Image (tube, rainbow, N blue to C red):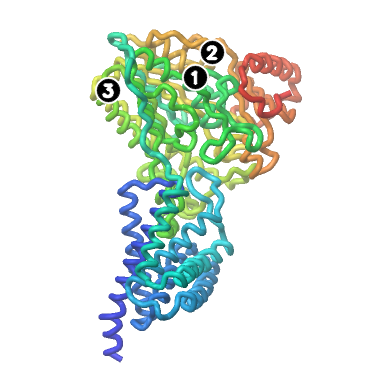
Amino acid sequence: MKREAKAVLTRDLPRGIGLGLVAGGAWWLVEGAANWALGGTITLPAALTILGWDLLLGAAGGALLGLLLGSAASAPVLALGMTGIYGLLRVYEPPGMRAELLFAVLAALSVLLGVVVAGRERRGPLAFVQLVLLATAATTFGKAGMTEVQSYFAREEPRALTLVLLLAGLPLAGVAVDRVVGLAIRRDGLRFGLELAAAAVALVVWGEPLSTAALDAPMANLPPAAPGAPDVILVSLDTTRADHMSTYGYARETSPNLTALAKDALNFTRARSPAEWTVPGHASMLTGMYPSRHGAHYAGSWNSGPEIYGRRRVFPLAEDRVTLAEVLRTRGYRTGAFVANFANLYRGFGMAQGFDHYDDAPGVMLKPVPHAVRFLQRFAPTLFKRPFRSAHEICATALAWMDRRERPVFLFLNVLEPHQWLLPPAPFDRWARALPQAERLARRGIFTHAIPTHLSEAEREWAAATYDGQIALMDAALGELWAGLRARGRYENAVIVVTADHGELLGEHDEMGHGGRMMYEGLLHIPLVVKLPGADRPRGEIGDPVQLVDVMPTVLEAVGAAVPPDVQGQALVRVTHEIVAEEHINPEFVNHYGDVYDRAIRVIYDGSYKLIATSKGERMLFDLEHDPGEARNLSADEPGRVVELERRLEATMSTMVTRAEAEPRAN
């Protein structure tokens, strides 16, 4: 017995660990190829981290197989056994064990069938490597081929029984394909080489890798800038509502660095977006036009828009719309954009117009998510969950680009932390960690597009605490940006604008998120801070109502440039236009979540009053001064005010220039 135990420890266990390391390397190679082909992105540090975990988990699995099967196990048994461990990493989800046990039974049957299909005579390292690669590739690409791309951030994989059946059955399919090829090509080495060559050709022919290189426009024939022209820095705090920022009176200290800027600038406390999601909000910011005039918004009906990255939900910003970057470029500015929201500010949406350098690369975006990462996310819920570059990365990259350019520059920065209000890293997780159910909620995703969304009080608190932590994380990066500008002597003589494209609902009115939701204040009330150049610049809080469309004319006036004729905004602080907002129909949400999204929305403000009108005939009137939470609809109590506001709203909307009538007009 002692001799047998010693043999296991000195022979079978090391052999199993070695085979496990080989299998882990195969997992990593196949998943890396799949991410490249399916449009994912992995940075070198992330790739090395995933490789380390694949090797570690593979070695652990190999050690287990070595102890269980011993030295007599054939190459097919070991290869399919390791592929079974690979599948178990994906299935594992504590605390239940039903899916894991079912998968173990089916995987064992798959191994037995696979040995019969592959042939017991297959032996040696080459056979093991070949079968592991084939089984892993069949699992990864087969599963990806049977999934639906529902998000820019990841491919939505099958769940429950379907997932278990695929993970158990696809490796067997890969071995079967090899056996069929073996009928014509009997030499293992030659067959393996031809299979690798065929896979490489297929990846090149059918792969759709995401281009991550920045767009760089030709620099020839640009006019010189005026002497002493100020730099322009425009910062978009994506998905950031004003009432969760301490700059605007929020109880938690979420934005001390924005507050510091606001004390040295003009702080507009009643700024609102004309839209509730990224594309129209940023297009309004960059063109000074409302969505129906600039035309960049939801397509309205299914497949009515142009195809952008495989989807037809959006009209992009048209080339004939003049952007802030284009105007500044004609005045000798070097223009650079650094955006975190690759999902909706990627180059195909038209926002790159006028930029010498447009950097829209994502960070770590896993398509598909490696099994080792899925396994580890059960214990570290936020691991590789953020596919965008951090605000710290965006600010540092922008400053480095500025250092290589002559003055003046126009920097457009988009930062995205609040868009995905997962548990933030320490110390910005302090509010969430203080909640009684923090660990449970950190592992459970509560975000949904479904309406209504019924959240418990604990879930509402969790949503707010994680969202606030992400705002604080983003604000810390802003502090680094201000310090970087001062260190370079480029703060004083600069126009700095900090705002947001829209806000976010955190469970109010039984709604979460943005884009297609009812246009409550959590979506429309945004921060807006404007620092003008010069020591005698104006400072202080401004309570007048203003909008994103006013950003472009304000910047152009500050640098002495003429405002293009189609611009609807006005230079701050002389805004007299109506304050309106609009939302077109999101066809994807209608398709996935039903008629609750099948309505266009328009909003108009009048003092403290706000009217929401939909294309389904809904009318909601709120007095925000006395009812900031929009809990009491006054439309039945004040029909005269509703009629007058509707008349003004219709008059304003009649001046818009639309490129497509994608949905019914509000009536």
Instruction: State the image coordinates of residue 428 (x, y, percent, origin top left).
Output: 38, 42
- Tag of residue 287: 1
Q: Can residue 132 be seen in the rendering of this structure? A: yes
Task: Looking at the picture, tell me which residue is in the foreground, 444 or 62.
Answer: 62
Task: Looking at the picture, tell me which residue is in the foreground, 133 or 421.
Answer: 133
Q: Quadrant of the C terminus?
A: top right
Kind of residue at badge 1: Thr
- CB-based contact (under 8 Å), mark 1 and mark 3: no
**Which residue was labeled with disc 3?**
405
Local SS, label 3:
loop
Q: Can residue 60 be seen in the rendering of this structure? A: no
**Which residue was labeled with disc 2?**
566
Instruction: State the image coordinates of residue 472 (x, y, percent, origin top left).
Output: 40, 36
- CB-based contact (under 8 Å), mark 3 and mark 2: no
Identify the residue at image location x=38%, y=76%.
Answer: 75
- CB-based contact (under 8 Å), mark 1 and mark 2: yes
Please determine whether, in this image, residue 572 is positioned above or below residue 430: above
Task: Looking at the picture, tell me which residue is in the foreground, 375 or 663.
Answer: 663
